[in-house]
Image: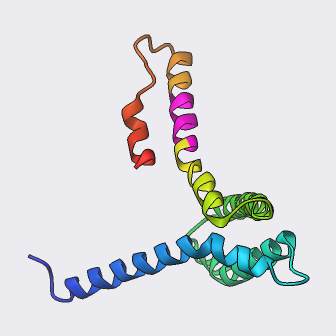
């Protein structure tokens, strides 16, 4: 049985997921429209977008480190990861200059499949290096990324 208020909480989070999906789906079209404005190029757009995100997350990150909820290495790793994501997004927005938003979306969505293939290859290589004789490239592990 669902606890009291559980259905409302579940409904709330489902709504959040729907909103996040809509935002993600509109990302490429919004970038294309914004970059069509005079004086806005892909570098300025990426810098603005990720600067706003970093400034929004910085107070919470500092507070989490101070409280001990995360350590400094984790916060530093998250900052490095965010920098790489920003760099990749800059590449995506540069790509929007030469293709449509829908094509860009499909191409960029393929990273899920690509990362899953590379991760499975690395898992397989690690097993081989450890001396596991019976190891194989397991395509079933790639199914969630393909879906």
Residue 94 among magenta residues: no
- Tell whether 140 sits left or right of 62: left
Residue nearest the observer in this picture, 9 or 37: 37
Confirm whether residue 65 shows in the render. no
Which stretch appears magenta? Answer: 114-123
Residue visible at 41% across and 28% down?
138
Residue 130 visible: yes
Secondary structure predominantly adopted by residues drawn in magenta: helix
Left or right: 87 as drawn, with respect to 144: right
The picture places residue 14, in percent across and down from the top left corner, at 34, 78
Q: Nearer the viewer, residue 25 or 121?
A: 25
Residue 19 placement: quadrant: bottom left
Pick the quarter of the image with the N terminus.
Answer: bottom left
Residue 137, image x and y in percent? 45, 24
Specify the farthest residue to the left. Answer: 1
Q: Is residue 144 above or below residue 19?
A: above
Taking the spot 21% from the left edge, 83% from the top edge, the residue there is: 6
Q: Residue at x 58, y 55 (%)?
A: 106
Q: Report the side of 80 relative to 1 (left or right).
A: right
């Amino acid at each position: 049985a669902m606890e009291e208020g559980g259905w409302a909480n579940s409904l709330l989070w489902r709504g959040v997921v729907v909103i996040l999906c809509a935002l993600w789906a509109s990302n490429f079209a919004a970038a294309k429209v914004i970059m069509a404005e005079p004086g806005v190029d892909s570098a300025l757009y990426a810098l603005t977008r990720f600067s706003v995100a970093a400034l929004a997350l910085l107070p919470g990150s500092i507070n989490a480190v101070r409280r001990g909820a995360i350590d400094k290495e984790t916060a530093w790793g998250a900052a490095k990861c965010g920098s790489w994501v920003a760099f990749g997004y800059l590449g995506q927005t540069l790509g929007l200059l030469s293709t449509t938003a829908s094509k860009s979306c499909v191409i960029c969505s393929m990273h899920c499949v690509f990362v899953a293939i590379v991760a499975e290859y690395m898992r397989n290589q690690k097993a081989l290096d450890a001396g596991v004789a019976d190891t194989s490239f397991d395509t079933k592990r790639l199914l969630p990324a393909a879906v």
